Amino acid sequence: MDGKRATANRADGPLAIVCGGGSLPLTVADAVAQRGRRVVLFPLRGFTDAAGIERYPHHWIRLGQAGRLRKFALAEGCRDLVFIGGVVRPRLAQLRPDWLTLRLLPRLMRLFRGGDDQLLTGVAEIFEEYGFRLLGPQEVAPEILTGAGPLGRHHPSARDHSDIACGLAVLAAIGPFDIGQAVVVADKRVLAIEAAEGTDSMLDRIATLRRDGRIGVPNKMGVLVKAPKPGQDRRLDLPSIGPKTVEGVARAGLAGLAVMAGETIMADPQAVATMADRLGLFVIGLPSDASVP
Amino acid sequence: MDGKRATANRADGPLAIVCGGGSLPLTVADAVAQRGRRVVLFPLRGFTDAAGIERYPHHWIRLGQAGRLRKFALAEGCRDLVFIGGVVRPRLAQLRPDWLTLRLLPRLMRLFRGGDDQLLTGVAEIFEEYGFRLLGPQEVAPEILTGAGPLGRHHPSARDHSDIACGLAVLAAIGPFDIGQAVVVADKRVLAIEAAEGTDSMLDRIATLRRDGRIGVPNKMGVLVKAPKPGQDRRLDLPSIGPKTVEGVARAGLAGLAVMAGETIMADPQAVATMADRLGLFVIGLPSDASVP
């Protein structure tokens, strides 16, 4: 393990990356490694794509194996921990609790019943009690954040901008309630608000309503607006978008999507831009002063 | 047509009832007739159940036949008009516009693209311009409104009451945006907010999320809360519940449902109470001061 020795003297030591689904975990790993910091991956059996994982030291874990994660992270000399990848709530049947998780179970069950904020903040607290420092992926790899301005060829129209403003106002209104991070607005009509179902499922709903003729909105009208919740722990649950989000927006018949620049993780920006151009959609990062409606 | 003559001298004249789906149209017709006022039904082809319609003078119309409705309502001597029944947005393919509707079409299309409030208020205005007076079904048949207190055997628990308070707070927050009239809250977590999809579809979503293990909430926990929007035209779109709503609440695995007393139409209260008792759910009408969270 030469790599270990080479970075062991660095102030922060090696970084443990707990990997969910999608391409983001390797993007973050590559960015951190390029800065010369050693990374150790902890891919999640059943969630993480195996391709590319072998490029880094890694230990497969199952969802719920907090003890195994702790043991191997300590053995690798990692004190810093990053969680990155798919944020869909797991099915309870996918949990494989080990002894540490079982000890924490009553606490985890209480957290699981709360909102996303509670769940994630609670998990972060637990890891910190066990001596780890939890970092946001954007802290170790700021290049994954969406920049300000349009990505790709298409720009929002004046009507799109007024739908975006309406969407931000709705998100601000529900902010105190720890609900979703996304809404769909078309011609100032709010078509959907995300709660427990997640963004992809919300976009599918719009596609179905449209197919059934229950939304009297022409094709290519309407905007998906995503923004972080006010109370959100930004180390764990920044809104994220990627090529799949753009496909969902297209299926829902919308004109484009708007996110907060600097507060939204973007998986594979090149693919997002290419796909948005091909589907004729806009993707825009809003400057942070846009969040005040 | 003896009935016609018998009620023709009454101050308000006969009442035209435009009937949507469900059992409410006949409930309203019966209540009005019992008060001694003549009723003329306008059942909607494809929406209204034919059974029982023949008990009253009636003229079948198709969705979009504003001219036909106007002609027959005038011929029957009706100046007062009530719309009652299924409020699901129709598919555009179901519209059969006649000449009057075609003339109004540009205006209707603009309304159709707006929120429900805009659509309904706009339709009301149009009928008033043509000399009709639009009444709320609760104005001619107040017995269809939900009373205060629990219906049936089961009562909300302390936790249910705190979920209800949370739901009312969310509805108050989104009130200014002309969104849905319903939310689902379980153990203070907001699981769903209704927008364009309607209450039944929102409850189906909860059932699916629960079946997929994506909601870590025990069975029989959580509440459906419905309340009128602040800006809502109460003649046309009061929230309504019925036996089908109770079934949806049961499928979603919730503990019960709460509505605003005096501001919610209830179809078939007897069947609602029986079904709630059988399924072990509570149904409660909240006193109107409960709407201030």
Image: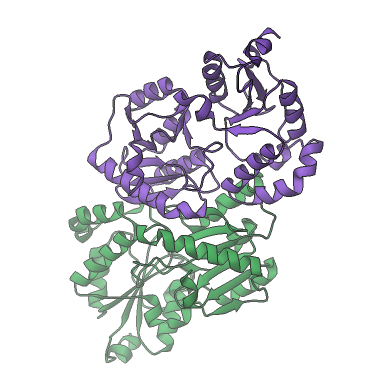
Chain colours: A purple, B green
Name the residue at 36% across, 72% down: B234
Name the residue at 51% across, 50% down: A179
Q: In the rendered view, does A225 fall on the left or right side of A123?
A: left
**Residue occupying the far right of the picture:** A99
Residue B84, placed above or below residue B15: above
Q: Position of residue A145 (x, y in %)?
A: 44, 29
Residue A203, placed above or below residue A79: below
Number of marks: 0
Most foreground residue, A127 or A99: A127
Q: Is residue B46 visible?
A: no
Residue A65, placed above or below residue A116: above
Q: Position of residue B230 (x, y in %)?
A: 37, 67
Most foreground residue, A118 or B289: A118
Name the residue at 41% across, 49% down: A171
Q: Position of residue A192 (x, y in %)?
A: 43, 49
Residue A283, placed above or below residue B120: above
Q: Position of residue A51 (x, y in %)?
A: 61, 16
Q: Is residue B178 visible?
A: yes
**Residue occupying the far top of the picture:** A2
Name the residue at 52% across, 80% down: B147
Most foreground residue, A54 or B238: A54
For the N terminus of chain A, the quadrant is top right
Q: Quadrant of residue A220?
A: top left
